[in-house]
Amino acid sequence: MKVGVIKAHLQVPGSRSLKEKRHAIRSLKDQLQSRFKVSVAEVDDQDLHQSAVLGVSFVASDGKNAQSRLQNLVNFIEDYRNAVVVAIDKEILHED
């Protein structure tokens, strides 16, 4: 069993309120959950108008599958038009 983990630091340009930021981030979270069947949460910067940090995780049966899913998720986040990626940390955790 492998666990994929992503921490995505995002900027939401033009957001003038927490409500606007949360709308954009909620849309990304919903798309990730429905398309990739992953767990997603805003894990930091909740009180900043133009910044968000998302945590994304999933379980895969093997390393090849985990690496492929991880890359597909990163590509999707980078292509999301309502936020700009500042940094993405990704990791695959292995069961001992």
Image (tube, helix red, strand yellow):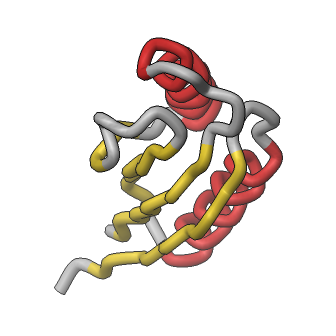
Residue extending furthest toward the left = 96
Q: Is residue 91 left or right of residue 64?
A: left
Judge whether residue 14 can be spotted in this image.
yes
Q: Is residue 30 left or right of residue 96?
A: right
Residue extending furthest toward the bottom = 96
Q: Nearer the viewer, residue 24 or 47?
A: 47
Q: Vertically, is 93 above or below 16?
A: below
Q: Vertically, is 86 above or below 47?
A: below
- Residue sitting at 74 percent across and 46 percent down? 76
- Residue sitting at 59 percent across and 37 percent down? 36
Q: Nearer the viewer, residue 34 or 83?
A: 83
Tally of numbered tags? 0
Image coords of residue 63 (percent x, y)? 51, 77
- Residue sitting at 23 percent across and 78 percent down? 95
Q: Quadrant of residue 19?
A: top left
- Residue sitting at 62 percent across and 58 percent down? 69
Residue extending furthest toward the front = 16
Image coords of residue 9 (percent x, y)? 51, 58
Instruction: Quadrant for the C terminus, please.
Output: bottom left
Image coords of residue 71 (percent x, y)? 69, 65
Instruction: Quadrant for the N terminus, please.
Output: bottom left
Q: Nearer the viewer, residue 5 or 52?
A: 52
Image coords of residue 28 (percent x, y)? 60, 29
Q: Nearer the viewer, residue 37 or 42?
A: 42
Q: Is residue 43 left or right of residue 89?
A: left
Judge whether residue 30 can be spotted in this image.
no
